[in-house]
Amino acid sequence: MLASSAGGWSGNGGEPIRMANNVWFINQEQIPYCILAADSYPMPAAELSRLVRSAFDKWISFFTDYGIDGLGRSFFPAQPFVPHDSKLRMTLKFFEVPCASADTPFAKEKLRFQFGLTHPLIEAYRTFNPEEPLGLAMKKSADGRGLMNHGYIWIDRFTADPLRIEHVLLHEIGHVLGMPHNSVYVMDEDVATHLSEGSQAALGMIQTLSWPYRLQTNARIGLSLEAYNRTNIPTQGRSCQENPLLTALIRDLDLPARPCYDVGLRTTQMSSEAIQIQLEFTSEDRVTIYQGSFQPLPVHELTPKGPKFFTILPGEKKWRAQVFDPIPVSEAWQGNIVGYGRPLAAQLTMAKGIILHLHVPTLNKWITLRSRS
Ligand SMILES: [Zn+2]
């Protein structure tokens, strides 16, 4: 976790910045890891072992849910010149083996967790980072061509709270699995602030309801209305009645006049080229549904936020950028919402949560609906 860096630490200097977010282990059967802890670490070894296993399992569930499971899916291109037939897959199988000691070279392990235990290499990286991070994911070496990068995950002795330790663990393992900063809640570049303040409920979670990785087909996301003057106005409660934006939106959508609506967004279809949604307005057990369709806004280069890999593959000369997400979606989409009246212009963005912008014709204003927890 490095607020000042583009990604996890990577090794021994000289690594191009674009490789900082590379997935560490590709096309390996399984990866042995081991765990070392300082004697003073405020958690027993068995508990640390359980936390590490739990963190891996959460990430594996995440990748499986989004189809980024690396188990038989073909490798999709980030750029058009990359062929679809690559057999490369992310390695998502990890198992624990014993460690010798912090001073010994790597033996069987490819990944070494060090809780409260540093060594000169880790100290050197900490020195370069003025922010004193709580954790680091650091490749021992990286040439950009290997499909296996040994390395360390170091976790500071900063708390005895298992949830906080697990949150930092999740963040650092996320770097090993190629998840860049701000791709999902736990990868927030300001993750340290979540540990000192903010919602306790979301600690130990990869994504939250208000900040999912992306839309998922058939999943419903609750939306909150945010006024154009940036005052939050709930869609439930008395203040709804005094919200001129909501009143105008209800009128423009030909919704029955009710004081408050609960708004939800359900994705019915999703690909790199198109998103179809249903916008659901619920009031007093009555649901009114509007259809929305979106196309990606033109971008110079698709920059998906999932696991990536920049490399020169064996026998080739060209650098290639590839991604593992089967739906490498654009972060900004344009389209419209079609109800019983005229279509409303709409935009959809996916950055630190899902945001739907809707144009309200009678006011000639845009309103903002945000994913909420
Ligand atoms: Zn980080």
Image: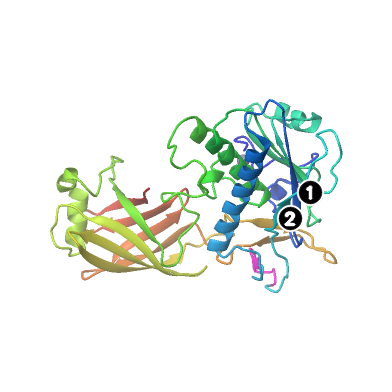
Residue 340 position in % (x across, y down) = 21, 71
- Residues 297 and 350: in front is 350
- Which badge, 1 or 2, comes first in the chain's sequence? 2
- Residues 111 and 143: in front is 111
- Residue 129 sits above or below residue 57 on the image: above
Residue 130 position in % (x across, y down) = 65, 26
Q: Residue furthest left?
A: 257
Instruction: For ligand 1, tell me if the residue under mark 1 lies within 8 Å.
Output: no
Residue at mark 1 = 110
In the rendered image, residue 77 lying in the magenta stretch gets the answer yes
Residue at mark 2 = 25
Tell me, for residue 297, which label it has, or none: none
> Based on the displayed image, in which of its 4 quarters is residue 253 positioned?
bottom left
Instruction: For ligand 1, tell me if the residue under mark 2 lies within 8 Å.
Output: no
Q: Residue at x 62, y 36 (%)?
A: 2
Q: Amino acid at mark 2?
A: Phe
- Range drawn in magenta: 76-83
Residue 75 position in % (x across, y down) = 67, 68
Quarter of the image with the N terminus in it: top right
Circle 1 crowding by C-alpha within 10 Å: few under 14, some 14–19, many from 20: many
Q: Is residue 368 visible?
A: no
